[in-house]
Image (cartoon, rainbow, N blue to C red):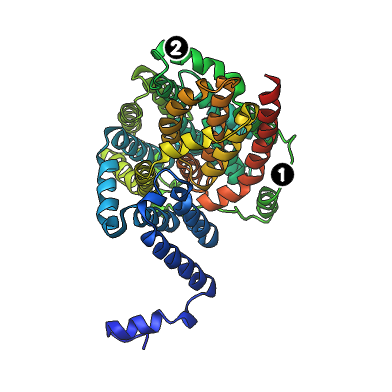
Amino acid sequence: MGNSSNIVKRIIYYMNPKRIDSKMVKLWIFYLLMSVIFFVLPKNMIEGHILILAPIVVLFVYALTTKDVMSSLILGTFSAYILWHKLGCVDGFFDDLMTVLSDEENIEMYMSFFLCGGIIIAMKRSGSTKAFADFVVSRFGKNEKILLTASGIYAGATSIDDYVSALTAGASFTPLIEAVKKPKLALAYVVRTLSINVSEMLPFGAWGYFVIYQIADAANVSGRAEATHIFMQTIPYMFYCMVACIIALLFALGIFPKIGPMKKAYQMIEEGIQMGEAQTQDEEEDFDGNNPRTKNVSALNLILPIIVIVAALIATGLNCYLAFGIAAVFTGVLYVLQGLMTVKDYVQCTVDGFIDMMDMVMILMLGYAMQEVLYAMGMETFVESVCRAIPIPSLLPFLIFVFFCCEEYLYSLNYTLFQIAIPVLLVVLSNIPGVNVPLCLGALISASLFGANACVVSDLGVVSARSCGVKIYEQYITCQPYFILSAVIAGVMYLAAGFLL
């Protein structure tokens, strides 16, 4: 019957629970049951209440069970639309997709990734990444500690924009890690941690810059100058950012031990197996060692485009799209003039780069759609009610950190959390006697950074995994012990600081 052309017979055959993995049968029963519950729940029970987080739990359960980020994100996001839009869930879902696709800032981000994908493939096919790897290995030998530490320093130094930092650090150092036969998952952990956490602590970094704007939007803040002053006061209280960076650098230096799945990754590499290696690139993207054009390639062919990216980013006021566009033109001219590839070859690299980045852009697009529906369901009201419900002001920093760590761990809202929570918190907290506002704001920011690091569907997690050539889920499980330990230490610091400061 499985080979029949009859549609009904095929459905009966392949949908028979006996022919489906029992784990998936249970998962689908869970998903369908939750969808029915979501459908019958009235809106007045949902708006501004904790039930708005229920679809995130569904997403998290599906991701942990299947280890499939894309499927879990699609189904988890759609369950949120069932919860809120009921019979209009399909219209609501596609309307919000159109919204996030037509947003100018989102378009710039998507195009930045597409262009960066083309540059990375061109670097590989031209032999530039191999030349850079050979150059560094010839100078420093096969020293993993030096390479991982250098990758962390590079990620932090270029973190004026965390996406640029993660993408270029991964592209530059992955060949080096492969050359010394060490786990790429270790590189992904170091790059992911340093790129985003350092960016937040820089007033002129992409994250810091964005937070300042959200502070300025609060009703009790007079302008950007005052917002900048408030932000500078929060920097010493970004405990998670500091602890996470310290642990990552100690890990890179070989001082902090390999624990949990990361230890397994190192054991597997001794057997010649790269744990979690992503199989996203076909043979056409590999460097052709027999091509006479790409022999004796200078390492500057990788270094110069990265310098141009960073310089263009600063010159254009953090416009990633324009910065990558300038770098793409520069890289093409540099490679074509040297004869490393023809114009046709370079254009094909750009096309293939668009294709290579498509799944990442889809994940980000779905993430933004989830943010749209969460905002519609009253996330702002929910955040305010949580803050007002805490009876002891000294506990506020600790409880804000713990609550939003849990929420961000299930689903990282990133920038949207700041948009929703910061203007509300600044007004609410300023009316509660005895509250250290910069400390509470630092706790909120730290919680968001923990989510960006630890959440399985975090956008930066997707970026760092792709740039380092590892699978998203394997990166997620290997990094967890380090991120959770950093959060626990930071939580203790917020608890102590709430009573001492």
Please identify the quadrant where the C terminus is shown.
Answer: top right
Residue where numbered disc 1 is placed: 258
Residue where numbered disc 2 is placed: 226
Residue closer to the observer: 399 or 96: 399
- Residue 406 lies in what quarter of the image? top right
Q: Which residue is drawn at 31% across and 41% down?
A: 350
> Could you classify mark 1 by the number of other residues whose Cα lies within 10 Å: few (under 14), some (14-19), or many (20 or more)?
some
Query: The disc labelled 2 sits on which kind of residue?
Result: Glu
Asked if residue 150 can be seen in this view, the reply is no
Query: The disc labelled 1 sits on which kind of residue?
Result: Lys
Q: In this view, does 328 lie to the left or right of 139?
A: left
Q: Is mark 1 on a helix, strand or loop?
A: loop
User: Does residue 427 sit above or below 34 in this rendering?
Assistant: above
Task: Measure how far apart labels 1 and 2 are at the Cα level.
Answer: 43 Å
Residue closer to the observer: 456 or 57: 57
Q: Which residue is drawn at 54% across and 25% down?
A: 441
Q: Where is residue 456 in the image (x, y as percent from the top left)?
A: 52, 48
Please identify the quadrant where the N terminus is shown.
Answer: bottom left
Tally of numbered discs = 2
User: Does residue 123 sit above or below 5 in this rendering?
Assistant: above
